[in-house]
Amino acid sequence: MTLENKTDIFEQSRPRLMGLAYRLLGSLSDAQDIVQDTYLKWVSYSGPEIENPVGWLSRVCTNRCLDQLKSANHQRLDYIGSWIPDQIQTEFEASAEEQAEIASSLTTAFLLLLERLTPKERAAYLLHDVFSMPFEEVARILDMQSANCRKLAARARDYVAKNNVRHVPEKQHQEKLLNAFQKAIKTGDVEVLGSMLRADSDLRADSGGKVQAVRDVIVGHDAICRFITDILSNAWRQMEITTQVLNGTLGLVIIDEGKMHAALSFGYDAKGQVSQIYIMRHPVKLKKMISAKGILSTSGAISWG
């Protein structure tokens, strides 16, 4: 197979590989590095003919991600404050139904919940439930028995369902929340926003210790409302606030003198109440926040032939 043919095959798989690696790692830059490593291994491979290149690429990418997760979990033990997955500006070219399905596996709440699973639970669940791979194929990738992969995915599925982090409300409901949040920032009036928060909602910010931001998780409706009126409203009132699609749902970007100051995304329960508020303040992550149009696909089922 020529280098050109190999490159063509890889580029057709790149969106799917990026989608998998980002969901496994929660880091767009790490996902890009691993996908590039996968490409280099692919073009340098000189062994027996590979009957299913797409399956081979997925296996290499997944196992490289699992290796990375071991290192990432160790590094986060020393992380200052809350760690939040990279925020991505998400654009879709799919139908509304497909958009909702893709978005449900990109929300910040969902990605953070995956952090509580074991790496192989995470991989089995994503490969089967999100990327629609039969368990026989998942078993090949994870080098496990199919029955064990089913058990891993089932445990993960139950945990995800119990925590209800894949709910994406209708756009109009999201817009209502964003309008209420902006009003709270601009005027200090949290009445409407407060009515959309759960009693046990929590707010966390990721600054990595690089800039000023709340380090402890703020829990509870009243505590969050006080934080918004006493801190955020005073700090952000004069800043520009824009709306962006972040990780599949509508979010807010705070601009200060032409520079991105913060990015906010939200988690919802099944009734549309806000269960989580995420504030990205890490300057490096904000600088790298890019459009993910066309690079986070879950489409294209893998066949091993």
Image (cartoon, rainbow, N blue to C red):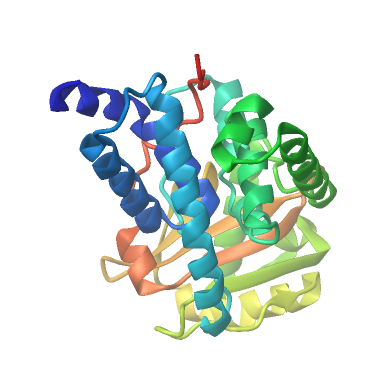
Classify 234 as above or below 93: below
Q: Nearer the viewer, residue 224 or 121?
A: 121
Is residue 171 in view from this perspective?
no
- Across and down, in percent, residue 242 comes to 42, 54
For residue 39, what is the image quadrant? top left
Q: Is 301 displayed left or right of 154 in the figure?
A: left
Query: What residue is at 76 percent from the left and 74 percent from the top?
Result: 219
Q: Residue furthest top?
A: 305
Query: What residue is at 42 percent from the left and 73 percent from the top?
Result: 282
Query: What residue is at 26 percent from the left and 66 percent from the top?
Result: 258
Q: Nearer the viewer, residue 27 or 2?
A: 2
- Give the total of numbered labels: 0
Query: What residue is at 45 percent from the left and 59 percent from the top?
Result: 86
- Across and down, in percent, residue 52 comes to 41, 21
Q: Dividing the image into 4 quarters, which one contains the N terminus? A: top left
Q: Is 265 displayed left or right of 60 in the figure?
A: right
Is residue 1 in view from this perspective?
yes
Q: Residue furthest front?
A: 48
- Across and down, in percent, residue 153 comes to 74, 40
Q: Is 135 displayed left or right of 46 in the figure?
A: right
Classify 42 as above or below 246: above
Q: Nearer the viewer, residue 62 or 278?
A: 62
- Across and down, in percent, residue 243 comes to 45, 49
